[in-house]
Amino acid sequence: MITLTNVHKAFGPNRVLQGVNLTIPRGESMVIIGGSGTGKSVLLKSILGLVTPDRGTITLDDTDVTKTDRDTFLARFGMLFQGGALFDSMHVWENVAFRLMRGPKALPKAQAREIAIEKLRRVGLTPDKADLFPAELSGGMQKRVGLARAIAAEPEIIFFDEPTTGLDPIMSGVINTLIREIVVEMGVTAMTITHDMSSVRAIADRVAMLHDGLVRWTGPVSEMDAASDPYLQQFIHGRADGPIASVR
């Protein structure tokens, strides 16, 4: 569904992406792993059109993302942001329904609220949370609200940016399970950026290892542990010694 071909991006002398080739199949969950500063976020921003590659192409359904109508293009996506990115001056349900109440196809407030409450239920939050403000919720609840917002408009593609950052191991497991269930139920194409190997094993159909601006390994998550790539093995096992340490 999404194809990146020889994608390069530099910021001054800092060459972040150095020829990325990657295919994300329709209806599958792709997880991008790699250390800090390896280009994962720039890769995501490039797909969304927030960053323009210096070279290479990115296509969605065989159409160059730089040549599509931006509103139509972005309407196909949902996003769970790393820090939640909830609007603190809006009630929970208004955060969830934010997209639904804007644009040429905006829904009436009552209908948008009804959908928001339905999505909150889907992520395990009761309707009484709808009229609270984000600051009145725990970190785990805020992450659930972010997930409800990501699915509110029934997107075809959902991006998850470090979905378990700042959560304890139990809540991380809850969020991972919710993400996996929702991806399967909705049949969406998903792309996740994470350092958390428990998330990788819970969420992924396929995994791509990004290091030094290149995809070093990609394949089914079931083949990850047996793969011979030294970059991948060092990262997934958290070893201090290996090719990643030698270049830092």
Image (cartoon, rainbow, N blue to C red):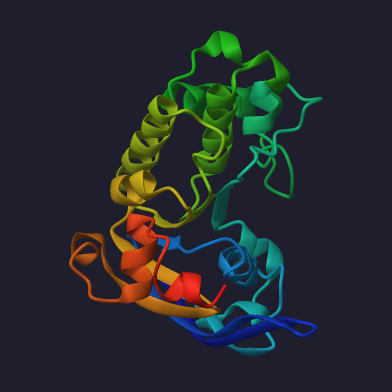
Image quarter where the C terminus lies is bottom right
Residue 159, image x and y in percent?
52, 54
User: On the image, which quarter does residue 242 sit in?
Assistant: bottom left
Q: In which quarter of the image is residue 65?
A: bottom right
Image quarter hosting the N terminus: bottom left
Q: Which of 192 and 18 is in front in this view?
A: 18
180 sits to left or right of 222: right
User: Quick check: 185 above or below 200?
Assistant: above
Q: Which residue is drawn at 32% across and 60% down?
A: 28
21 vs 209: above or below = below
Residue 184 screen position, x and y as percent: 30, 46
Q: Is residue 94 above or below residue 231?
A: above
* Left or right, 248 with reference to 219: right
Q: Which of the two residues, 207 or 76, is positioned nearer the viewer here? A: 207
Q: In this view, does 68 lie above or below 201?
A: below
Left or right? Give the position of 90 relative to 47: right
The reply to whether residue 13 is in sight is yes
Residue closer to the observer: 240 or 133: 240
Q: Where is residue 218 in the image (x, y as percent from the top left)?
A: 33, 73
